[in-house]
Amino acid sequence: MLLSTHGLTKRFGGITAVDAVDFTLEEGELCSVIGPNGAGKTTFFNLLTGVLEPTAGRIEFSPTDPAAYGNEAEDGVVDITDAAPYETALLGLHRSYQITNIFPTVSVLENVRIAVQAHRGGDSWRFWRNVNAFDDHVTEAESILQRIGLAAEADRTAENLSHGEKRNLEIGIALAGDPDLLLLDEPTAGVSSEDVGQVTEIIEDVSEDHAVLLIEHNMDVVMGISDRVAVLNQGELIAQDEPETIRESEAVQRAYLGGYDPDGAATGTDADDGGESGVSAG
Ligand SMILES: Nc1ncnc2c1ncn2[C@@H]1O[C@H](COP(=O)(O)OP(=O)(O)OP(=O)(O)O)[C@@H](O)[C@H]1O
């Protein structure tokens, strides 16, 4: 077990956005979280990363380095229910935001290098003492750019990238934190249909050596790359299974998929096409 939630609940006044969710993610798994608008997906991510405090329930995480949280967990399992965002990040739980977190006016390489430095050079005295640290960070940033298909764009100013390239850069920035678990919030939202394939390839590649939790509205992406799909509906986890099983589940169809036709091109497959399936870029 890498991550687990137990009775995880978040209420906003009379709304139960996340309702007693019991969920487990294994190491190396790529799990998509789907559900109609307002189902609680973003709130679930916000609870996992410590942006929001749960109303009830518990979150446990088994990081590579439990000591990063300042307490040695006996069995390697750390209770992160009350952890702040910087603490979940220190533990190896990293998130790429739907709202861009790129520095627009600096280069692509510099964006990733800063993120590498923030992660590795945390002890500033060590950074300044180690004259090679800067070069090390550049080398690591370059290898991340290679991985996210942006090596040729290293010197470009980030704001000049295409939308799809920016989404890839966000994944690169999250990778710079050397995460155990990467949470991706709608990485294909707003990406042109020609660029979706490239973003998808990068997610698949990253999932080779990271666990990935993905909020995604593009059903072709979800069904194509997920090991498992978890379905939220009105805050409840109503199903979690392999994509094939989810696709055929009547409860899921009723709650969410609407007119999704796995063999058809249009219905419910486009993040910008909210229509039939009740899906939108959110
Ligand atoms: N800060 C908040 N205050 C009050 N209600 C909130 C807050 N954040 C979310 N909600 C409510 O909680 C419910 C779940 O919202 P959430 O954004 O988590 O859903 P979602 O599945 O991510 O939706 P989308 O697909 O539209 O992004 C909704 O009814 C929403 O209005």
Image (cartoon, grey):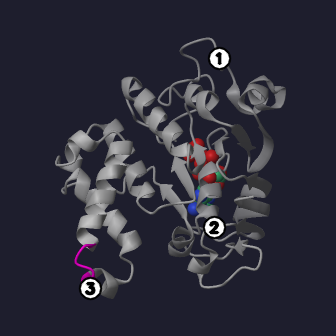
Q: Where is residue 144 in the image (x, y as percent from the top left)?
A: 36, 51
- The stretch drawn in magenta includes residue 130: yes
* Helix, strand or loop for the magenta stretch, by majority: loop
Along the line of sight, the residue nearer the viewer: 139 or 223: 139
Assess mark 2: CB under 8 A from ligand 1?
no
Identify whether 68 is placed above or below 161: below
- Residue type at the position of mark 2: Pro
Tell me which label, 2 or 3, sits earlier in the chain: 2
Residue, far top: 264
| Image quarter (top left, top right, bottom left or bottom right) of the N terminus | bottom right
The residue segment tinted magenta is 128-132
Along the line of sight, the residue nearer the viewer: 103 or 175: 175
- Residue type at the position of mark 3: Arg
Q: Inspect this view and state whether residue 102 appears.
A: no
For discs 2 and 1, the disc positioned in front in the rendered view: 2
Tell me which label, 3 or 1, sits earlier in the chain: 3
Please tell me which residue is depicted at 54% across the width and 29% down the height of the picture: 274
Q: Would residue 141 appear left or right of 171 to someone viewing this image?
A: left
Q: Name the residue under label 3.
A: 129
Q: Would residue 253 appear left or right of 50 to someone viewing this image?
A: right
The answer to which quarter of the image holds residue 84 is bottom right
Q: Name the residue under label 2.
A: 63
For discs 3 and 1, the disc positioned in front in the rendered view: 3
Q: Mark 1 points at which residue?
A: 262
Please tell me which residue is depicted at 47% across the width and 42% down the height of the picture: 187
Label 1 neighbour load within 10 Å: few <14, some 14-19, many 20+: some
Q: Where is residue 65 in the image (x, y as percent from the top left)?
A: 60, 72
Tell me the SS state at disc 1: loop
Label 2 neighbour load within 10 Å: few <14, some 14-19, many 20+: many
Identify whether 81 is placed above or below 245: below
Please tell me which residue is depicted at 41% across the width and 52% down the height of the picture: 99
